[in-house]
Image (cartoon, helix red, strand yellow):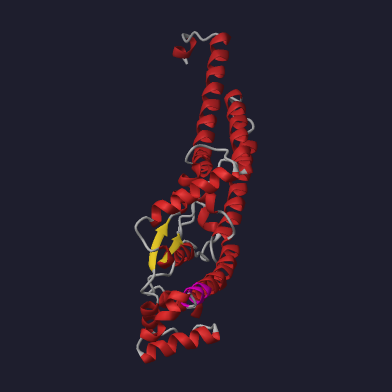
Amino acid sequence: MGKLKNLRVTQNDIDTQRKNLAVLESAEKLRELVADLGSVAGYLSQADMVLPENHPWVQHVQGARTAVLDKLTADKAAAHASQYRKQLADLKKGYINAYVALHSKARLGVAEEKSKAALRRDPRIVTLRALAGVSLMPMGQLAEFEDKLDKLKSCAALVESEFAASPVCPHCSFRPASEQGQLVPAAHTLRSLDEELDHLSDGWRQTLLDNLNDPIIQSNLELLKPKSCDLVKKFLASGTLPDPVKPEFVAAVQDALSGLEKVMVSGDEIKKALLEGGSPATPDDLRKRFEAFLTERCKGKDTAKLRFIIE
């Protein structure tokens, strides 16, 4: 007790220490809050880069994040910690809802995946693959169709609880920001491809009919082997492709059309030719440019036997 009598501590000293302890306590609370919010804030920062820039959630989260940081900077005592936690939790929940909605559109479900698999085996596409053996056919159309079908991805395993640690689907790694040019609902695209396959089938069938009915080809049909000639004539008479299209039919058609020469032309080549000399242009200008383009591509060839295929 004697030693305590010699301890000289003023009221000011006590008040100062009390303030220091209060500051230390506030700092500790703030540190704990920042650590607590850090994981959610990091999650939201990653999520910000997953959705397309123009998505409403992205615009909302950017403003909300700035507001929370401003409040947190001013709130040294972390008095509104529960409010900050709720704000960030709401933002995370909003992100999950937005992501799941986009995911369900961009990915095929179980039933749709079965439809896609069926389309791969569809008799129409089997017929087109067989007819690709005829050199005159526009095979680029079939390749483009199959490419679009391949790009339709399936993912029916996603559940919201899997978003706790990462803002991206762990099964298919769907990132809307990198697929924003393809965010047409996958189910809608699948239906469109089914219709497109109908158009392709009809188009290829008509292409064969038109070319086999060409007077040049007609005059040469009798030069074919009897069996091949019979196959071609049956097709011309019925207007319907055999089912299935067998190699013998493909070979017969190829032989019949062998007198024709295929000329491949891309859309870009036509565009370049039409723009030669500038734009805008008069109808007469465009006509002359296109005729000049055709003349150049037909130079030195028998135009009656040429068949242009636009890719």
Q: Is residue 2 left or right of residue 259?
A: right
Instruction: State whether residue 152 is above or below residue 237.
Output: above
The reply to whether the magenta stretch includes residue 156 is: no
Residue 89's x, y, as percent? 60, 44
Q: Residue at x 51, y 74 (%)?
A: 210
Say which of 55 and 16 sits in front.
55
What is the count of numbered marks? 0
Q: Is residue 216 left or right of residue 11?
A: left
Does residue 166 appear anywhere in the picture?
no
Q: What span is colored magenta in the figure?
A: 206-212
Type of secondary structure dominating the magenta stretch: helix
The quarter of the displayed image where residue 184 is located:
bottom right
Instruction: State whether residue 32 is above or below residue 99.
Output: above
The quarter of the displayed image where residue 101 is located:
bottom right
Q: Residue at x 40, y 75 (%)?
A: 257
Say which of 295 and 20 sits in front.
295
Residue 69's x, y, as percent? 58, 29
Residue 192's x, y, as percent? 59, 65
Does residue 163 appear anywhere in the picture?
yes
The quarter of the image holding the C terminus is bottom left
Residue 128's x, y, as percent? 45, 75
Instruction: State whether residue 191 is above or below residue 66.
Output: below
Q: Is residue 135 left or right of residue 166?
A: left
Q: Residue at x 62, y 47 (%)?
A: 94
Instruction: State whether residue 41 is above or below residue 28.
Output: below
Q: Residue at x 38, y 83 (%)?
A: 252
Say which of 197 and 247 sits in front.
247
Say which of 187 and 44 sits in front.
187
